[in-house]
Amino acid sequence: MSDQVAATPHLDALIIGAGFSGMYQLHCLRDRLGLSARVLEAADGVGGTWYWNRYPGARCDSESHSYSYYFSDELLEEWEWSERYPGQAEIMRYLNHVADKFDLKRDIQLGTRVSAARYDEAANLWHVETESGAGYSATYLITAVGCLSSANVPDIPGLDSFAGQWVHTGQWPHEGVDFTRKRVGQVGTGSTGIQAAPVIAETAGHLTVFQRTANYSVPARNAPLTEEFKRWCHEEHDEIRAVLQDTPNGHPFRIADRKVFDVSASERQEIYEKAWEKGGLQFRASFQDLLADKAANDTAAEFLKGKIREVIKDPETAAMLADIDHPYAAKRPPIDTGYFEAFNRDNVSLVDVRKNPIERITPKGIVTADGVEHELDVIVFATGFDAMTGALLKLGVTGRDGQSLADAWYAGPVTYLGLQSAGFPNMFTITGPGSPSVLCNMPVPIEQHVEWITDCIAHMRANGIARIEPEAEAADRWVAHVNEAANATLLPLAKHSWYLGANVPGKPRVFMPYAGGMKRYRDICDDIAAKGYEGFVLDGAAGDATAGDFAAADSADSPGI
Ligand code: NA7
């Protein structure tokens, strides 16, 4: 940390990241609590993950009327989405509209990447330094860096020697990539790869998809919104908000009450067919036990594998695409527009890199273990992210007694409610590991976290409380509860899931998001605040060390899936 810090501006709150979460946090702290607050953002614009993910076909899988802030009726009334799912460009227009409407940009410093954040115990302040050497101090540090913002480019030998162009979907060039008549290799078949492949195939000379883990996908059935639906959204936003806040995943649909084996095989087939026709993430809401009972899940898995075999004309390709090794929705379930159909095109082929791994990259292309050199002009890495912890650890955070966040989390992230870590006073994280975050329609947990943090800071200021952090025991109990919640579902059965950190070599295998459901989580957070921030240490005074019988705070929710 340079000497510059001492002479630099002091703020009540410093927020890192200007996506959905950082923007709303700024609004709450500055405009509701009247604090001095500033956002530092690495990108040259607001938008967070949507600023970077400009790849072909980039679109949100949440339905647009739910992928919105719900804190402002005025905003809900004036904004109109055009399609069932919002595309990247439309989301960027929306977030810029919000930033302008609430006059946020004057306190958002763009092009500013944080390189270090150090807690100074004597002064009870956070000192933050940026890559350009500028420094700030702040009483509260709020990390709003997103769960999926640290791109995972696989360490494949020879990548530097590649003579063509390579890109990662999460760092897509603003000027775009011209695939016309080019030989394109796409590595990765997660939600991103499944969106990108059919669009790339439209202009590429040839597209080779390198698949490590075959994936389920349900058609999105995207379409322009009708005037009637738009009117309904305006008229019923209170009702929509109530549903979003009442469902385990913050989506605008309810999970059916029925169980898979409560109905006959033919009824089940009909239910799946209807859900397939309707399209989207709602498919997993067809039955309440799809993520709890393996035999129940198998019925959905078989239905979806059957659809793949039906669509794909070449039996060998169909077999590779339907050879799925995990229960349906145990990994984040993609939705698509013409993904499987793309493999029926003459200019698209599939390589199974589970059986035949990528060995190296040469100037000409990708060499697989069978010795074949796949000649390419462009490589697209749709290989995901160092999710949930990657971007946080890159901030270079050091807490009390010089302990780094990386050391504190060496065996996996340890948080209380996903919001705070012991030893890092007054540092709050929005959608951190241990929160429901990525298992939900993101704006819902984001609004909840931001409002909880805002209320907590308001409580501190009203009561003269200078610092807050969790008791180590409360955080340990929360981690145990997060594991318990995951183990009550089929989610841990997906061994190659980024929920577990399994996609990044060397990363501790810990189930990171809270699978107990958003509604249950909200109730737990409210209960803890109502009990005087039970499980937190306020100004050095520990609360009730026995706090945190989280299972007892259970509601009638089904697991958050
Ligand atoms: P994901 O879901 O992590 O998918 C990444 C894909 O890339 C997945 O198929 C991976 O296979 C594959 N991958 C990763 N590394 C390699 C290497 N080294 N070789 C071959 N294949 C590899 O990321 P997305 O960007 O698609 O989606 C992330 C989230 O963004 C999504 O869930 C939504 O919430 C939005 P694997 O499955 O690890 O075997």
Image: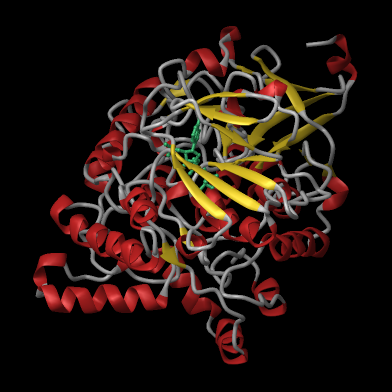
x then y, percent, for residue 28: 68, 52
Against 519, residue 156 (above or below) is above
Residue sitting at 35 percent across and 62 percent down? 308
Closer to us: 514 or 126: 514
Q: Is residue 9 left or right of residue 488?
A: right
Closer to us: 145 or 342: 342
x then y, percent, for residue 198: 57, 60
Q: Is residue 299 left or right of residue 414?
A: left
Q: Is residue 85 left or right of residue 529?
A: right
Q: Is residue 276 left or right of residue 464?
A: left
In the picture as drawn, the residue positioned furthest to the bottom comes out as: 228
Quadrant of residue 512 within the rendered picture? top left
x then y, percent, for residue 475: 39, 27
Residue sitting at 32 percent across and 52 percent down? 319
- Identify the colour scheme used: secondary structure
Asked if residue 126 shows in the view, the reply is no
Closer to us: 132 or 9: 132
x then y, percent, for residue 239: 47, 78
Asked if residue 202 shows in the view, the reply is yes
